[in-house]
Image: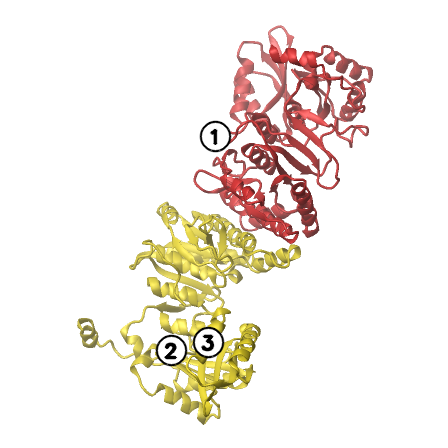
Chain colours: A yellow, B red
Amino acid sequence: MKPEGAVRGTFLKGRQMGLIVQKFGGSSLADPACLRRVAARVLETRRAGHDVVVVVSAMGDTTDALIELAHQVNSSPSDREMDMLMSTGEQVSVAVLSMALHVMGVEAVSLTGAQAGIRTDAAHRKAKILRVNPARIRRHLREGRIVIVAGFQGLTPLDDIATLGRGGSDTTAVALAAALRAERCQIFTDVEGVYSADPRVVPDARKLKEIAYDEMLELASLGARVLMSRSVEFAKKYGVRIEVLSSFVKAPGTLVKEEVADMEDIIVRGISADQDQVKLTIGHVPDRPGMAARIFRELAAANINIDMIVQNTSEQGITDISFTIHRDDQPRAREVLEKAARSLKVRHVNVDQDIAKVSVVGVGMRGHSGVAYRVFHALAENNINILMIATSEIKISVVVRKKLADKAMRVLHETFSLHKAPRRPAVKKGARNARKKS
Amino acid sequence: MKPEGAVRGTFLKGRQMGLIVQKFGGSSLADPACLRRVAARVLETRRAGHDVVVVVSAMGDTTDALIELAHQVNSSPSDREMDMLMSTGEQVSVAVLSMALHVMGVEAVSLTGAQAGIRTDAAHRKAKILRVNPARIRRHLREGRIVIVAGFQGLTPLDDIATLGRGGSDTTAVALAAALRAERCQIFTDVEGVYSADPRVVPDARKLKEIAYDEMLELASLGARVLMSRSVEFAKKYGVRIEVLSSFVKAPGTLVKEEVADMEDIIVRGISADQDQVKLTIGHVPDRPGMAARIFRELAAANINIDMIVQNTSEQGITDISFTIHRDDQPRAREVLEKAARSLKVRHVNVDQDIAKVSVVGVGMRGHSGVAYRVFHALAENNINILMIATSEIKISVVVRKKLADKAMRVLHETFSLHKAPRRPAVKKGARNARKKS
């Protein structure tokens, strides 16, 4: 996946110190009391001397109520009209949050996505931000106002309202932070930050002080639902520092930022599990060049994302191909494969739903050997069988039986001592200068 | 009051036959069942061969709910933010009505006021339409679509969302009909049309087939709440034919149109009563030139509209001045007057709330003498005392005691035989041609 579109000159590297973009989700805005708490939080940031741009989602379950209303009149409403309808949710939020700030005696102004200069492509319900024209926001900031922007929405080339799809308000916040060269983009959520593992599974999981974009991307796409990949990719591309923190608890969160040298001192940053995959195996594929290509071309044509792939030559001239996909894609994938199976003369397609993927992520792996061995050894010691393996430069993923996934996470968390604060060596000044010169 | 602003060349006289603008209010859109009924009505018009532009208000009590939400966070929210908030009500309506039409297999597209090209001044919550750029609506009509426009809203010169104030969706409909040169602008309401008098008071009141703009304006401003004056003024200025009809009962409504010669054959079109006035009397004003002017200048400066005025010289060099105003303006008016009374050395200010104004309206009065006499005579015969009188070219208003207002309406309705269908003489061809030549 590539970061969003061809962005114009409005996104430049470098940051405007003092400007902070804050994003609050729907659960932080569920009722007037919540709204007042958010307003107080924004005001606090303002009083600390920052310019503030706030991005908000729809209040509480507004979005669900709007979807319900739509379905009462049309069981399959058009994407364009759904966007027209759903975008009102965020518009209500910005108006009411602005009113809440006015009560506190602060100058604030609300803007729709269109008014905030957010232009998207025409892919309704999953639009991508093409560019941001921050002129109007800048003007309001110069006038000394807090600017409240409706998240999740923008204007298409045809001047229609489009929504950005899941996690869209995060993307809005990051895009605005990029366009405004904000010092920081704070994403307020219902967790206190990014953890070394899911605290519900691994009780001694630790909140991370910082994490590199690439690590966050691996964790996000692997099932740690704190930030959507799209917004992290956007942040990485434009160097936006994201802080993930709690809207309920006042505590520093996790900083998602560019990779710096000493991050590599930490080998494993975190561990995640993805329970939403299924494994498909195509048995008895004739082992001729191009067979796999044909199968995966058909799957790609049906818009099915493949995650891990393993090919196994089992008999003379015959091979098994296994791969994992999201379980939502299973019915479609099965259809495609059964059709392909007939024309390719393969014997059978097997579906295994009883799997989970557990991944160990860290940019420090690049400079350290033996990580894979430690993963496999720890799992073997604990009688956890590995069904598939995939690795990247900064990640090792294994597929295990679903019921063993939690245990695998705990074992690996322990193996890499993630419950302990990282020992960070004193900054090796000489070494870093040497690196710069090279 | 003048019709709205400096409208550009987009409003031209002459009509595009076949195009109908239909406006539906909130009570016609209260729930999904209502929405489907409205959609069916629109579709029927379309199937009869018309292009259709639909203007809608917010569904049911949405507007009240939004106001309530605002007041939960701010007891006096800013007008600009209220507009941001309230405009979502109509946006929801257009999206959902469009979806309801899609279910019926019709091409429909929803537009916000901004997308429909409606530009207003910057007077939030009571904005006036400055101009309409109908290019986008025309494009969608050419594509064969039904276009659904959010009423009550537009975009200010600063690209803020503004709402038009009471009756605003009617104004939107009329403005679009003018800009698109529509054949007709249908306003669907909870009554079946404009009546010769309020049917709740005068049981044999008759639904009018047609009424001239000026007659409708007099009736609208006199308390017949079917159409707001602003939309009628707009319609008159641009020659838009309005039809007022029921969204629940299928029957022809009342056509509000330009005055034509044979309308004058009907002397009295209708009778209305206004119970919302109070009468103020300033006693013992020195009868010197300019005294009245000074008093009314002060009232005008306080933005108080004066309706009827009577001056009565009661003693040598001393005069009483009585006038009526809307009862909502009474506290403010009293304050202004008591201040003026001191500096002008007048004795007292008297407030009489026990009054009602009953008016007889008809363009036919212009060509017929004796109407005033018939009004006064009929009321006298029935022991209804007249407290004040005011007349215009097409109207005679009398102020009576509140409890006699209903009786006065019935008496006058009977006097002018308004329960009977008008006897319309055969068109006097010669006479009309003669008029044209002159």
Q: Chain of mark 2?
A: A
Relative side of A283 to B421, left or right: left
At label 3, which amino acid type do we have? Arg
- Mark 2 residue element: loop
At label 2, which amino acid type do we have? Arg
Residue lying furthest top in this view?
B316
Estimate the x, y position of residue B425 in percent, counting from the top left. 76, 17
N-term-proximal mark, 2 vs 3: 2
Characterize the local packing of mark 3: few (<14), some (14-19) or many (20 or more) Cα atoms within 10 angstroms. Answer: few
Please tell me which residue lies in front, B433 or A205.
B433
Label 1 to label 2, Cα distance in Å? 64 Å
Residues flagged by tags 2 and 3 on a common chain: yes
Q: Chain of mark 3?
A: A
Q: Which residue is mark 2?
A: A269
Q: Which residue is mark 3?
A: A294
Estimate the x, y position of residue B133 in percent, counting from the top left. 49, 37
- Mark 1 residue element: loop
Task: Specify the quadrant of the image occupied by residue B202.
Answer: top right
The label nearer to you, 1 versus 3, is 3
Label 1 to label 3, Cα distance in Å? 62 Å
Height in image: B247 above or below B279?
below
Q: Which residue is mark 1?
A: B8
Please tell me which residue lies in front, B328 or B37.
B37
Q: Residue at x 47, y 56 (%)?
A: A151
Height in image: A135 above or below A34?
above
- Mark 3 residue element: helix
At label 1, which amino acid type do we have? Arg
Estimate the x, y position of residue A239 in percent, counting from the top left. 33, 63
